[in-house]
Amino acid sequence: MSRQVFAGLKVADFSWVGAGPQIARELAYYGATVVRIECHRWPETTRTAGPFKDGITGINRSAFTAAYNVNKYGISLDLNMPRGQEIANKLVQWADIVTDSMSVGAMAKWGLDYESCKKIKPEIIYFSTTQMGQQGPYNKVKGYGFIGVSYAGYSHLNGWPDRDPLPLFNNYSDFISPYYLITALIAALIHKRKTGKGMYLDQSQVEVGVSFLAPSMLDYIVNGRVACRMGNRDPYVAPHGIFPCTGTDCWVAIAITNDEEWQNFCSVIGNPDWTKDPRFSTMLGRKGNEDDLEEFIGEWTRNYTANQVMTMLQEAGVPSGVVQKAEDLFNDPQLKHREHFRFLEHKEIGVHAYQSPAYRLSKTPCSITKAAPCLGEDNEYVYKEILGLSDDDVADLLIEGVITTDTDIPEVLGGK
């Protein structure tokens, strides 16, 4: 394999939960050396959140933590202790990039905010990703992505028009904001290569979420219309929905965007009498009679499997897709062809599937070689080989509790 695009890049990863760790993970996929800093005394949220391997809880058994931290080295360090902060400063001195996804002000308490890190290493690139950003009247608002997507307007749009708003299945902003920051980090690295200067990047995850609602925002700005909940429907497309198929809880998505696609659809299903109804001859007509339209389409789709419907319609140029379950994804031929799922041996979970990036670089493909670390798994390597501490230094830090161990896990989480 060619030299990875981020080979030689060093990252001190102080981020936690979802958005921050994913950013460092993407860098690690392509060759960066990423050291993740954690503490047994207060394990980060994903380590205490399921799903857990075999349903057995444990700070090293969470699939979330494993998914977000592949290819990283993991150390345990108590940043509340002065010597812990000294070690953290050594990591900053070593690193090219420092990551932060804590609440505003948390890193400053440990002397690890950007201004402090810049004094240690003036050319450092440092990013913070929080719900609201570092400045403004709501900058101290805390919360996870569920709060962010609600504040950004998603929950108002999610659900049925005659029912209350619904949360998204997951914290959507956690999974789109990382790629904004990755792009900004690449720009910062190019800037540093040209000028030798570092940079501070401040991201608001809520603002990322708002940017993905641009059509609704523009419609309000131009027409004064406030977007509302509409189930699976679309304001400009009909039919646009999820339809039942043969089997238990099996569904297919169909979206017909113009009259040509509609005619192709009618041909596929055999041009039954209802397709000749004048109510369905135009997009506006179909849009105005969606209840009846969806009932007719559902009567047809029920006779076939979701894959059969998708194949027939796709071959006729009609947008359609199977509604896949988790098991379906692992058996999907397209994902298998692209080697989307990679399997590695995790020390506690065992053989575990990891998702590769959805993008491919032609000259330096991603390398997924190291399962996500157990908490403190790479202490010896990082403290001795990267930071140059002696055996006696490490022993002293362990005795003092600066380097935490399993014995420091709180009792409520299974500590001793």
Image (cartoon, rainbow, N blue to C red):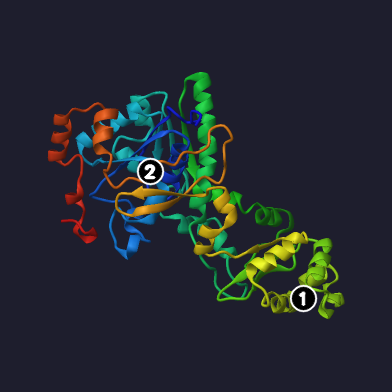
N-terminal of the pair, mark 2 or mark 1, is: 2
Classify mark 1: residues with Cα within 10 Å, few (<14), some (14-19) or many (20+): some
Q: Residue at x 39, y 53 (%)?
A: 352
Looking at the figure, which quarter contains the C terminus?
bottom left
Assign a secondary structure to mark 1.
loop
Q: Residue at x 24, y 26 (%)?
A: 388
Instruction: Count every numbered label the image shows and give the total.
Output: 2
Q: Amino acid at mark 2?
A: Ser
Q: Where is mark 1, residue-wise?
A: 289
Residue 235 visible to the viewer: no
Q: In the figure, residue 272 lies in which quadrant?
A: bottom right
Assign a secondary structure to mark 2.
loop
Residue 51 drawn above or below residue 297? above
Left or right side of 248 for 76: left
Find residue 15 and name its label. 2
Q: Amino acid at mark 1?
A: Asn
x and y, in percent, of residue 124 in the image: 41, 27
x and y, in percent, of residue 91 in the image: 31, 31
Separation of disc 2 and disc 1 at Cα? 50 Å
Residue 94 drawn above or below residue 256? above
Left or right side of 296 for 131: left
Identify which residue, 325 or 20, lies in the foreground: 325
Residue 15 visible to the viewer: yes
x and y, in percent, of residue 120 in the image: 33, 25
Identify which residue, 373 or 240, lies in the foreground: 373
x and y, in percent, of residue 290 in the image: 74, 74
Left or right side of 403 for 200: right
